[in-house]
Amino acid sequence: MVDLLNTLARLNPAYELIDERRDMILHCRNSGIDPSSRSFMTMNNIANYNNLIIHKLHVAATLGVLSEHEGLSHEAGLFLSGDIECIDFLEYISHHASISVEEARAQLLQTLKAGMVEFHPTDVCNAKCSGCIRSMSNPHGDRAAIYPADELELLKVFDPKAMVLVGGGEPTIYKNNSCDFNGLVSNLKQIMPKMALGLVTNGIHWPKGDWYRHFTFARLSLGAINREDYQKIKGIDAFHKALDTSLRYLDCNIGHIAFNFTVTRDSLRYGLEFARFIWNFVKTRRPSRLQSVSVQYRSHIQPPILAKTRDPLLDVSDADMEVLKKALGQIMSDSDFGFFLVRNTNVEDLLQATRSHTPRNEAPCGLALVFRQIRADGNVQPCNVRPDDARVRLGKLDDEVNLIAMAVRQFKIYFRQPGDEYCKIEHCRAHGKNYTAHHGAGGMDTNDPLNAFF
């Protein structure tokens, strides 16, 4: 366990490690610790991002969507601005690639494929959590969108390796006409049978049906170790109900169950206590599942569009961090719980708390090519730190012209050209995920990604 502290001490607290964890996973392997639970804390790890990025850039370059100067071609820009019609743009790319218009159209639409999709089937919720994206992006609560069940077929255009059902609202209470959550899951698996499914839920409601047999991952947003704190966070009195439901998740065939803890200045002091609470709870109630359970620490970071209203009290101080490090040092003498922290939690993310990051290089936004957040109203975003932000929106799932525009616009976001400062590398709050997208499967050179195509 001393080696763990040395490893953690070397980690730069100013650098975002969220969803990378490469250094800690390597440490686990070198120490003879099975890092399988740690590796599967996020479903991002099962998608082959790197190869997908390279493939998309190759297709876009071949079709003339990209210029030789790291940006959209002149014709692609004219199409997005509405200065030329869709059919004229399709004729241009078909001529550029010396193929038929139909083949050019098909190839361009195929670049919509994603490695990972985050689908918000409903904005309706059974809790009143402080700081959720629904309340931040829609503070007056003047809408509660529900994705139409008869339009699920449209999601097939993304053909993802993995999809996580999340919110928005609470996915398990989805209801649209006669389609409930069980029907939603069944329909998604019929439409995309090879896709892996994950779920992020508050764990309050257990839906009817056998939907659970389709999931390989579920994250429960418990976030507290007692009834009082839970009620402050969630706005409802359902702590014990959520714990009871978590046992049902542990008893079904879902391979991995994660318990979520959101890190703020107020919650930081309870971070390690939360991990111990989950460790004790599972060890006592479902000991056979302990090794397939993880604790996922996630920083409470507001979307950049709300940066002007950000509460500085959310930021954790150096003194807070020193108290946490001292507590961690004492825990390491407890070998059983310390082993759980190493293998089954992303404790290094807790140690950086709400701090930002120091980007390593001027990388383009690989996430824009491989990730999709599909909101309940049908809008598609290229990352989940700018939800509902029209300036980076790829488009809406409806007609073919919008799909073609979406395919082109993803490359505009890839080159960090949304027209504002929030996607610049120094402000990007998805840098950890973006770095993983580029380096997770082969180490693509992000400094000059188009050299192979021109």
Image (cartoon, grey):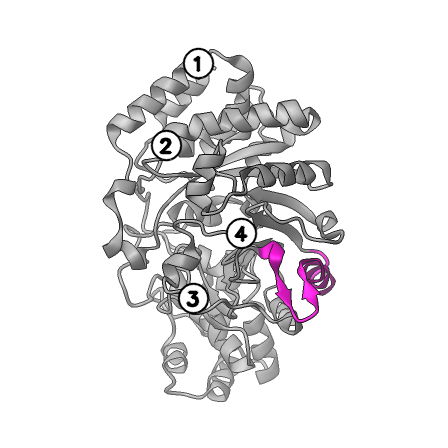
Rendered position, 358 above or below 368 = above
Seen at 74% across and 63% down, the residue is 190
Give the residue at x 50% y 60%: 373
Which element carries disc 2, helix, strand or loop? helix
First in residue order: circle 3 vs circle 4 = 4
Q: Which is closer to the viewer, label 2 or label 4?
A: 2
Q: Is residue 32 placed above or below 201 in the rendered structure?
A: above
Quadrant where the image shows the C terminus = bottom left
- Residue 411 numbered mark, or none: 3
Lower sequence index among marks 2 and 4: 4
Q: Which corner quadrant of the image does residue 303 belong to? A: bottom left
Front position in the image: 364 or 221: 221
Q: For the magenta stretch, what is the residue range? A: 171-194
Q: Nearer the viewer, residue 304 or 177?
A: 177
Q: Is mark 4 on a helix, strand or loop?
A: helix
Q: SS class of the residue under badge 3? A: helix
59 vs 267, left or right, is right
Locate residue 302, reporting x and y percent: 34, 51
Amino acid, disc 2: Leu
Pointer 2 residue: 268
Alpha carbons under labels 2 and 4: distance apart: 32 Å
Q: Do the residues labelled 2 and 1 touch (CB within 8 Å)?
A: no
